[in-house]
Structures are given as C-alpha cells and as structure tokens.
Amino acid sequence: MKKNTTFQYISICLLLILVSSCSKFLDQVPNDRQTIEEVFQKKRPSEEYLANIYNYVRDESDQWNGNPWTGNCDEINVAWAKWTIYQVNIGNFSPGTAPFYTWQSYYNGIRSATYFINHIDGNKEILALDGQKLIDQYKGEARFLRAWFYFMIIRQYGPAVLLGDNELPADAPSADMMLPRNTFDECVDYIAAELDKAATALPLVPASDRDYGRATKGAALAIKSRLLLYAASPEYNGNTAFASFVNTAGKPFISQAPDRERWKKAADAAKAVIDLNLYRLYEDPSGDPVKSYRGIHLMPWNDECIFVRKDNDLWNWDYNCSLRSAGGWNGISPVQEMVDAYFMKDGLPISKSPLYTETGFTNGVHNMYLNREPRFYASILYNGAKYKGGAITQDSITVDMTYSGKDGKKNGGEDYSHTGYLVAKNVSPETNRLAGISNSRPYVLIRLGEIYLNYAEALAEYGGNDAEALKYLNLIRKRAGIIEYGSGEMPTLHGAELIEMIRAERRIELAFECHRWFDVRRWKIVKSIMTDLHGMNVNKDGTEFYQRVIADTRAWKDAYYWFPLSQYEMDRGLKLVQNPGW
C-alpha cells in the first residue's frame, strides 16, 4: 500500500474520505457531495459507516508481526527471526523503516469518526424511527472511537496532532495543512473531555447480543482511567529527562513539574468505572482459580469484560502458542524473568517463599514448577506439564521441550521454544490446527481486573488511603486463589512497599495482555529490564536443560521510549518535531 502522511490525507477532499471509509458496505460508492448527503439521511448506510470506523480498532492478537507490546519487553521471546518484532528487538529500525507504524491508520480512523460526527445529525430515517437519542448514541460511539485512536497514538508515539472537529476543505493551501504536535498534557485533556462527552450519550449495556463489542459508558470511563493513570506516571509527569523535547515555540512537550494531584484524578477515574456496578471479576462456577483466570479470556461476554474486539485472529495466537507435537507452531515463549515473577501458592515471591526450590523432581516435574500460584498454571506451559490444548486426541501430552524432545530444538527447525516455555494464557483447548478447528472468541481490550489495579496504584501513589488500595489489590489476589495481604498470614502493606507489590501484581495479572511494555516505560524502569533475558537451556537434554541461560538480548537506548514518526511524515509535515533520539 502506498505510504501517505496524516497531513497529506487531511488535504484529500471529503469525497475521497467517504469513498475509502464506506466502499466495503455501499453498493454504489458516493461520487459527489449530494450523494454523500443522501447517504447520511438513511439509517442503514449511516450505521454501516459507523461499523466501519470500528475496523480501525486494532487486533492485538498478532504479537510478532502486527504489534510489539509483549515481544519487546520482559514477557516473551518470539521464535521466528523473519518477523518484524525481531528487527525491533535488535534495534534495527529507524524513522526510515518505521516498523509497526500505526500513526497513519489511526488518523484515518480519526477522520472517519469526525466526518460521521459532523454529518449524522438530521438523519431523516433515524429521526423517523428512533428519534434524536439514537443519533446522539451513534455520535457518542464515534466520539469514543476517535478518543480511543488518539490514546493509541499518544501511548506509542507521545504527543499527537489534535484535529478536533475541523474538516479542512479540499482547496486549503498547503500551509494550512502543516500542523504541529500538541503537548502531551493538551492531548490528555482533550481525550479525557471527549470520553466524558461520549459517556453521557452511550448506553450502560449493549441493547442486544449483536451489539456486544460496541462502545458503552463503562468502556469510555475505563479508557479514561487508563489514560489518566499514564498521565500521572513519571514518564509524563514532571519528567526532566525530556526537558529538551520542545515545540517550535520552545514549550516542553512533557510537563517538567510533577503534579501529585494527577494521581487523585486517576484514582477518581478508575472509581467511576467501579461505581457503575456493572462489572465483576469472572469466577468459574467450579470455584477453581485456574479455570477462573483462564475463563476471563475464554468465556465470551463474561461480566469482567468492558471493551472487546469481536473480529480478531486469536486462532493464530492459539496456533503459535501450541506445542508442535499437537499441531502448533511452538514459538511464543515466556522468558525466565516472566516465569520467575509468578508467586508461590503461599502468596510470596519465589525469592522469599520457603516452598521454592530449584533442585530435584517430583513425578517427573522439576520442583521449581511445583507449589506455584494458580495463575502460573493458567499461563505458563513448562516441561513435564500435561497438555491438552490443541491436541488431536483427548489424551494429554507430556510436554518435552528439551533439545531432543518431541517439541525441542533438535527436530523443530524454527518452530521451537527458545526459552523452554510456551504461553498457555488465552490459548483455547478447543483450537486444533491439524483438524482445522479454531475457537472463536472476543479479544479482550479492557477488563475490570485492570481497573482494580489502576485504582489501587493511583491511590497508593497519591497516598493517604492505603487501606482502600489494599482492598482492591486483595480482590485480585482472592480471585487468583492466593493469600491476601493483611490476612494474618501476610503482612499489611504501606507506602513504597505497597506500590512495589501493586506493580508485581499488575505484571502477573495482566501478563501477555499488552500492558507491560507501556508500564515499564511509564514507571521509568525500562532500562533495568531491557537487558539479557533468560530461559532454560534448550540446547541440552536431561537435567542440564534446567539451567538458566541467556535466551534473548534486547537492544535499548533512550530513543525507544517512543516509536519514531516516519521520515516520510517528517518530510511532509514541516511543523512536526521528531521524538527525542531519532
């Protein structure tokens, strides 16, 4: 596809915008303004236009060639060097190559949403059938989506170019289309205000089953929670390391004076979602915490889900995570640092628990994998485990990822785990590549577990209400089936220790859900984790396999806090300022 920039696309006439947005749905592509006006007087074409805007919500199930959020931090190794994530991990990218480039796509979505907002009022068929309330809801959905796209831009690229509701005319001079980036705080304020406005028009719950996956009030408030949590964090709140990152007028793009009150705003935003009383942590009817944790993603439309993407390629995630001996591609591999992050069943880290040992075996399983917390068994496939997911028979497979094992390196070509582990989380046991069966389910983008952790973190950082922060941290631990803090067996946490454990809990609870990449950056700890990453010794058999060795080395420089704007974008947008270090 030919590359174009945000600013080049802004100059395209509104007729072409509509053609690109609606061609999938309309039998006749509008080719003049009068026809476009007619389209927005009809109910079905307008609804189809809105449905197409949802297509710009990215499917993040592809974490090797489409998105880098788990493969470019201390969560997973991706086995295949041919995929784009490998080039990012070795530092082989620049404004000229711009991998995982989403800037242009999100601005396409923003323009489509703006066009819809500006033209849906007065739709005769909707007014005749459903009245103004439905038009307001549809505008709220488009406004939510536009805010979502802006947030996706600023989390990956930093400050964005805010376009508002303006539609530049087709004959606008080129100078009018050379638009500068806004400051990060201006972007946050705009997105938050848009989400508030959207929330007032959006329904509390979907009107019917067919509407699941569409924006709701809870979804708008939830993304605001995430937005304000990021804005309160050290990367964006008084970060003097970015003092020289300024606009053409010399104003810093990132605030230089820390503001503690941002944590209060973040806490209030998370509590607003909780106070809707619409969502609850998913628990399996059996009470089994492993099934409960797995069910968050495998049980469609459960009450923990706040915003999902219905159309996705989770079948591909299933295939890539599954064992080669069960027909999978055997290459989405948690690194040892992620494996070691899981608590023991007594709720303690492995460094503090008397239950943890790295010597000996029990019934063929190395003791380092015994007595771990339930989320470990729901998330990590390790050597010696019994595996049924994706198998072509009902008989379980004993996992063997040693060098000569059936799922090991010796006979695997590129299809082998580089760490001696595979991801089990969000991998459906119903998916079977050999039989051509895949389990269709929504891709969860926001869920209540995240909101509880957002709330706990913001409260702990703001200070003064550690008990409330601990309450919501413990709700996560209770569902996970491990001992709660302050229960008598575990201490009550305060201050810096509480913040540390909230971060540890967030790492585990939200593992492989595209949070860690952004968390370590906003906390400004990324340098300490983007180093050598480890795994088991997949070049050995027997007991020699169970030795920590370097499995992956990640390149890092400060420029990687944000992805670069493409050079093509910079050449066209003369008022743009490139991100630091590029």
Image: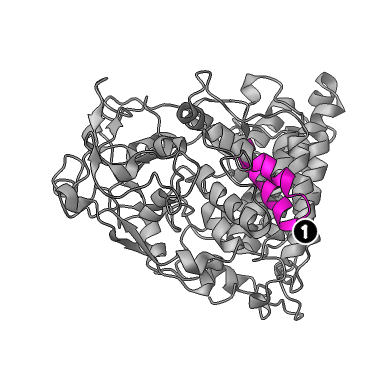
Q: Is residue 151 left or right of residue 383?
A: right
Relative to 509, does residue 127 appear above or below in the rendering? above
Q: Would you say the magenta stretch is mainly helix, strand or loop?
A: helix
Question: How far from the left and from the top, in percent, is residue 567?
Answer: 53, 71
- Is disc 1 surrounded by few (<14), some (14 to 19) or many (20+) residues within 10 Å? many
Q: The residue under label 1 is which amino acid type?
A: Arg
Q: Nearer the viewer, residue 469 or 42?
A: 469
Q: Nearer the viewer, residue 268 or 85?
A: 268
Question: How far from the left and from the top, in percent, is residue 160?
Answer: 68, 62
Q: Is residue 118 visible?
A: no
Q: Label 1: which residue?
A: 262
Q: Is residue 295 visible?
A: yes
Q: Is residue 310 magenta?
A: no
Q: Is residue 540 left or right of residue 351?
A: left
Q: Which residues are magenta?
A: 446-473
Q: Nearer the viewer, residue 411 or 142?
A: 411
Question: How far from the left and from the top, in percent, is residue 332?
Answer: 35, 46
Q: Nearer the viewer, residue 63 or 427?
A: 427
Which residue is at 27% across, 19% downward? 394
